[in-house]
Image (cartoon, helix red, strand yellow):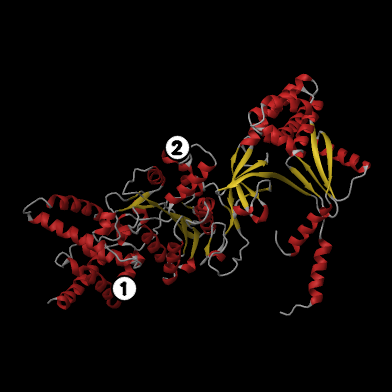
Amino acid sequence: MALRPEEITRVIQEQLEGFQPQLQLKEVGYVLQVGDGIARVYGLETALAGELLEFPNGVFGMVFNLERENVGCVLFGDETQLHEGDEVKRTGRIMEVPVGEALLGRVVNPLGQPLDGKGEIKTTKFRPLEVIAPGVVERQPVKEPLQTGIKAIDAMIPIGRGQRELIIGDRQTGKTAIALDTIINQKGQNVVCVYVAVGQKQSTVARVVKTLEDHGAMQYSIVVSATASDPAPLQYIAPYAGCSMAEDFLWDKKHALCVYDDLSKHAQAYRQLSLLLRRPPGREAYPGDVFYLHSRLLERACKLNEKHGGGSLTALPIIETQAGDVSGYIPTNVISITDGQIYLEANLFYAGIRPAVNVGLSVSRVGGNAQIRAMRQVAGRLRLDLAQYNELAAFAQFAQDLDKLSRDQLARGQRMVEILKQDQYKPLTVEQQVVIIFAGINGYVDDLGLESLGKFEQGLFDFLDKKHPEVGKEIREKKIMDDGLKQKLDQVIKEFKNGFATRNSP
Amino acid sequence: MKQTLLANRYARAFVRVSLRGGKAPEWHSGLKNFSVLLRQTPLLYTSLSNPGIPFAKKKELVEKCADVPVIQRLVLHLVLKNRLGILSEITRRAQELLDEEEGVARAVVRSASPLSLEQKQELSESLKDWMGQTVLIEETPDPQLLAGMVIRVGDTILDNSLKNQLKILEHQLAGRQ
């Protein structure tokens, strides 16, 4: 489109003619002190808690503490550009972040500014950073499953859409891996995923983004990044910003998943701000309202009722423990807020059981409502069997010879543990999970060696895909295991096993 | 921040004493004069804060510079406590407290060209209507505003300068809010 100079002149002329000179009324205060991501401002007697303040040079701040002599606020920008005596303006607004479809596939900072070099984010929609969570009348119980694609979790610790499930464990036990697998598995499920990185290394965030891109998951995901090198105020608002971005989809009758990686670092950032603003320290030097910090965030996860569109926002907070200590302040807080936890253990991880889920300590308080019937039918006994196996295995270490029943139970348990192992970035569909767990608990693999189970599983899936695609389809559509389906599965597995045995016999 | 807190305490005490003495405006202007004197003659400040000079000498010096005993005592107290630096802050705060006491608001008006007497009168009256209390006007010229004026009362600023209008226009033309 060619623009002519006259047209530009005309547009400017129109603008100038329409310009109404106006008296501007503003309320101001003056900077007393700046440093460490906080500022104290003299004046601003009418400022409200949580209000957005405008500093010179385009720096913004949020009112945090209202004191008798001054206002303590946190800064979201370059504090080195501020000086003592600078003018601070009230804006009368609260903090907002850009939201909407335009953010999909982007990496942004907690203010919604792009970090990925893919240009401006064109959106006109904004949502406040902090909102009151939907109330009781707007909600309905969690009832649809959110498939993670991980056998151990979908079978025993099912997560529902709108649930809050904590992922807890020491460093290097695969917490982020579970969250990433879940995001990757949402492909084609109509779920928007938001990954919030708080206080992590830039390299880690870059790797996460790369992984998501490689698996084609970035197109339905948003990454909100506040790394360890970002100032504490940005780390503090990052989970709320991510939640607001996800909430836009929730109210738009869609489904969203929000991963907070991790909330221990978030609590630390909040502790830093609170101590600098001289709020009194409590246990582990965290301020008194650190519970509210996380509860108001996680309360925003919800399943709306049909009247409000039926959208959902699932939260997967992550907490890092120190040497397996779940009785720390932050872990106990978040455990009590969430609807269950997935507990990962370093010992299991090093023993080669990956994902290293401790079945005994992990729970999902939503339970069977978040599973399809077929999965509930096959996996109902699984947790009990595994608990019995673990008990027996501990006992069997001392026993010399065991009766046949115990030996069989041990063999079955070992095979179930083997079946529940799963490689990273290889999510399984629910019908695949149902088939392999059905094979496991009904003893079809008892006579196979432990080392050949991986091959058996892969072979069985390929066999089903090629020869009997109708079985998977039936499970998917009927969502229930009736006798006919059970018989059919029995035949198919036996048929495959015969071929498998001859192919793998020496 | 600590300084404002401290200055607030001293100012409050000074205002209370001077209100009881019944000569608050005079004493306050005396304090203001001393504060200005202190700023304009660095030698006075350095001698008062020099620990090498005996206190008796400092006392003599202060008594020569200020005639009201209350001001002398306040200054000497600050000298003893090594807090002479907050005197200007105390003066400012005392002014605010006195204004509050008398129900007077103080408006600082920055204008591009000097205001005429009628203009001042009119401004004072319209501000009185707006604020609901008597408004004293302090005028400072500021040619950088180009035209119009900026009025500041307490934390509130009324900006009607050409400079600000041009800035708003610039934002509108550039499509920014």
Does residue B135 appear left or right of residue A156 in this picture? right
Q: Which residue lies under the disc numbered 1?
A: A470
Q: In the figure, residue A185 lies in which quadrant? A: bottom left
Compare marks 1 and 2 and give the one earlier in the sequence: 2
Pinpoint the chain carrying mark 1. Answer: A
Q: Nearer the viewer, mark 1 or mark 2?
A: 2
Determine if marks 1 and 2 fall on one subunit.
yes
Q: Position of residue B6 (x, y in %)?
A: 64, 32
Secondary element at tag 2:
loop
Chain under callout 2: A
Amino acid type assigned to the residue bearing label 1 in the image: Glu
- Give the tally of numbered discs: 2
Q: Residues within 10 Å of mark 2 (few under 14, many from 20)?
A: few
Which residue is tagged 2? A282
Vertical order, A502 against A80 (above or below): below
Q: Residue at x 60, y 57 (%)?
A: A126
- Farthest residue to the bottom: give it: A2
Is residue A373 visible to us here? Answer: yes
Res B21 → quadrant: top right
Instruction: Tell me: A382 left or right of B135.
Output: left
- Residue under the image location 53 percent in, 67 percent down: A116
Amino acid found under the numbered disc labelled 2: Gly
Q: Residues within 10 Å of mark 1 (few under 14, many from 20)?
A: few
Label 1 to label 2: alpha-carbon separation: 60 Å
Decide: is A84 above or below B22.
below
Is A461 left or right of A135, judged from the image as shown? Answer: left
Tell me: residue A182, above or below residue A320.
below
Q: Position of residue A207 (x, y in %)?
A: 42, 66
Q: Position of residue A490 (x, y in %)?
A: 21, 68
Residue closer to the observer: A366 or A179: A179
The quadrant in which the N terminus of chain A is found is bottom right
User: What residue is rendered at 71% in x and 64% in y?
Assistant: B175
